[in-house]
Image (tube, rainbow, N blue to C red):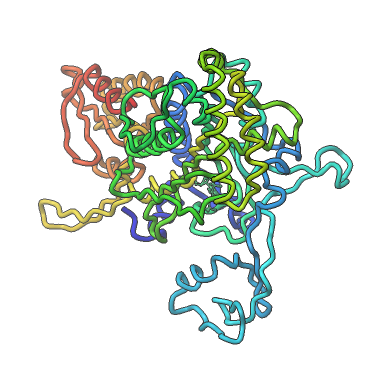
Amino acid sequence: MASSLDALSALCKRRGFIYHSSEIYGGMPGFWDYGPLGCELKQNVKQAWWQFTVRGREDVAGLDATIIMHPKIWKASGHLDTFADPMTMCKQCKKLMRADQIDDIRAELGKKAAAVNPAFALSCPHCGGEMTEPKPFNLMFKTVVGPIDDPSNVAYLRPETAQAIFAQFQNVTATSRMAVPYGIAQMGKSFRNEVTPRNYTFRSREFEQMELEFFIRPDEAVEILHGHVVTLADNPDLNGPVQDDWGWEVWHKYWVEQRKKFLNAVGLPTEHFVEYWQKPDELAHYARACVDIEYDFPFGRQELEGIAARSDFDLSQHQKWSGESQMVFDDPLKQAAKKMDDAARAAFVEKTQKAWAERAAATGKDAVAAVAAAEKFCQNLFDGKYVPHVIEPSAGVDRLMLALLCEAYEEQKLTDEKGKEDIRTVLHFSPKVAPVKVAIFPLIKKDPDQDRIARDIFRKLQKKVNCQWDVSGAIGRRYRRQDEAGTPWCITVDAQTVADGTFTVRERDSMEQKRMTYGEFLAMMYDALEF
Ligand code: ATP
């Protein structure tokens, strides 16, 4: 595991994982490019997520929406009014900082930090100067659509991919032939004008997200359908098939477990990340629960991704701002409600009103309005209609890549037979995400038979996975080069290959070498790549 970012970032630059964006012009803070190995790693991470979240399931559909959308979307979502960080500037050295990160910056600077000046409400960790009053700074990048630079043409680069899913919810529902509970997934670029982009690619201004909105029935609908709602207290089996009588709490925990399984599958062992359950006072006002999966990066424990239970907030907001219904029609619910007699319906409405009034009182909202809303909500449920609730697992591609790089990095001290010490730098990627799966070498490059057979294997494997061809230098050096790229297997073609077709397969982590036939190698490789 990488203990500091310095060695890791040097390797990433040297081997073509990550470069500064626009480097020849001095770079741009918060923008990064992925080189030949980095972009392969990125593709693999995204493909793994898509396979695990969309293709490998029967209840999730995909979406690929535009980056620039109708500005009203950001009004409805709350991003226009509240998506802001508190920004402050040092009056002396003019450095800009996020007011809530001043203590972290001071800790990072360590001995180099300026002493806290008690005369100021906020003092600069760089020079000790006085900081300005923090001001909210909206993180959305603005742009103008069309040829006229007028405020009416202002649009925004999306700060998250999720909102497009809500905005297209009715289209996807109508065309995917799926019914709640079901999810819509999207991967793609997001943009945030972060005040202080920091920690390598961890907090960037342009990054990619992989988000799933998993729509579920409100618990009240589950109760009408099944006569009960399964909660975590019922100890449900989260590893088996999903169940129709699960309440939101179970669906939320189910997705936390799914995300952990995914992280394990791509190479992060459970012991290396923690599940942080946000405390009630940390939750967004609409959220019922939120779990951050945090990873111990070399710069400290930080959020890798989040899984939030967001109630029906998002679709309700879009219903309100667009004027378009975001309800679904749930026939099994309508049929179940039909079987309730008047007394059962009245009791159900009363129970719901009481629960809603209590929740409103606990959160400082209008209890009378809640009682009226509950009545309307119940009548809609009896007609089989509701606005779905949502569980949102939201992950960052770049953050996960950084975690995988940190996790994979190792400098091993090796001693050869002659007692000579050497450092082997290895990236222990899971084969599922490794940028190069196989490197193929003829042992003796000038041997025409070895060269021909090795090239033949290379061409065949190239059609299946990303491969590299390397003939330069001694075989030991070629192995080391692949270790640094994180290539799990190297195939060496030698004299015996010419005689019997078997070749040497050298495994990266154990450095063991085995003779295999092409068929044996393929079976072993596919086994390791499968989810
Ligand atoms: P943070 O608190 O770190 O700013 P956040 O809670 O605002 O993150 P979300 O809005 O929940 O993050 O975004 C979901 C995921 O998107 C994050 O868990 C992270 O993986 C990724 N992400 C968010 N902002 C950035 C960024 N500036 N750079 C890289 N990845 C990001």
Q: Nearer the viewer, residue 157 or 237?
A: 237
The image shows residue 176 at horizontal and vertical percentages of 57, 16
Q: Is residue 391 visible?
A: yes
Height in image: 294 above or below 438? below
Q: Residue at x 16, y 37 (%)?
A: 512
Q: Residue at x 70, y 26 (%)?
A: 325
Q: Is residue 434 visible?
A: no
Q: Residue at x 55, y 38 (%)?
A: 311
410 relative position to 374: left or right: left
Quadrant in which residue 498 is drawn: top left
Q: Nearer the viewer, residue 293 or 427?
A: 293
Quadrant in which residue 369 is drawn: top right
Height in image: 218 above or below 396? above
Count numbered badges in the picture: 0
Q: Nearer the viewer, residue 117 or 313?
A: 313
Quadrant in which residue 135 is drawn: bottom right
Residue extending farthest to the bottom is 119
Looking at the figure, which quarter contains the C terminus? top left
The image shows residue 506 at horizontal and vertical percentages of 22, 34
Q: Residue at x 88, y 46 (%)?
A: 150
Residue extending farthest to the front is 343
The image shows residue 167 at horizontal and vertical percentages of 67, 31
The image shows residue 329 at horizontal and vertical percentages of 61, 18
